[in-house]
Image (cartoon, rainbow, N blue to C red):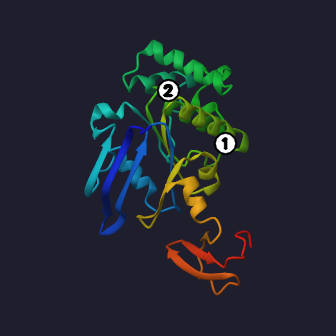
Amino acid sequence: VKKEVQVEISHINKSFGGNMVVQDVSFTIETGEVFGLVGPNGAGKTTTIRMIMDIIRADSGEIRLFGQPIEEETKNRIGYLPEERGLYRKMRVSDSLVYLASLKNVDATVAKERAEELLRQVDMFPHKGKKISELSRGMGQIIQFLVTITHNPDLIILDEPFAGLDPVNRQLLKDIVLELKEQGKTVILSTHMMNEVEEMCDRILMIDKGRVVLYGNLAEIKWRYRNNSVFVKCDVVIGDLEGVSGRKDHGKYVELFLDGDTPPQK
């Protein structure tokens, strides 16, 4: 069954001060998938997300959301967790969720019910009356995540959502993301951590220095490179290695082509 395309990016480019940060990037994201936007810090992931959100405009290329060009009304169907966190520190937890959902045109009564349901789900209902400033850093990040989904968006964009979280809260967030997928939501997960991608994503786009390095189904990509190559992130030049028959430079990543009897672990 062919799924509906929620996000369609066609040949977008963006430069700042003559420096090209996104170069000819194209991809699509379908309904109900967790899509990984992967690459090292500074690769162009956040810039790409900001263009999808219409926070900044692409110099050229086209972005379509839900089958149409970006409109203000479209943005109410999106939940966005930016890399730079920020909530009203003097506002109480439940009020933060309800108020920010109301900005997305959600009825206050509906927003309150949804907020209480989510707070119970993450075992934070007893803290609903606390001010944001009274929460631990980890709890604050969980609330920021709940703010992203309280208005029940169709498309959820998460920029480095697990950064700084302890293992318990990291797993809690992963479980919620996978539950959102089960509900038919579409999730963009931007991260530089490949283990998170492998655990959660259906398809990925890997970019480096603003260019596409890899794009496609994660299982197929892993199968394609299963025996004969590995990707290594490095900041230094790698010399000749035993068992390596060739290499291809992808910026901060180097693809090493292995001899037939060399295991990737080696």
Image: 18 above or below 91: below
Residue situated furthest front in the rendering? 1
Mark 1 packing: few (<14 Cα in 10 Å), some, or many (20+)? some
Is disc 2 in contact with disc 1, using a CB cutoff of under 8 Å? no
Helix, strand or loop at label 1? It is helix
x, y percentage for residue 109?
46, 12
Q: Amino acid at mark 1?
A: Arg
- How many numbered discs? 2
**Residue at left offset 45%, top offset 26%:** 151
> To which residue does mark 2 refer?
150
x, y percentage for residue 40?
53, 62
**Residue at left offset 58%, top offset 82%:** 246
- Does 21 sit left or right of 208 as displayed? left
Q: Amino acid at mark 2?
A: Thr
Cα separation between marks 2 and 1: 19 Å
- Does 235 sit left or right of 48 as displayed? right
Question: Looking at the image, which is closer to me, 97 or 196?
Answer: 196
x, y percentage for residue 190?
51, 50
Residue 265: quarter of image: bottom right
Residue situated furthest top in the rendering? 109
Quadrant into which the N terminus falls: top left
Quadrant into which the C terminus falls: bottom right
- Does 266 sit left or right of 118 as displayed? right
> To which residue does mark 1 refer?
170
Image: 106 above or below 255: above
N-terminal-most mark, 2 or 1: 2
Helix, strand or loop at label 2? It is loop
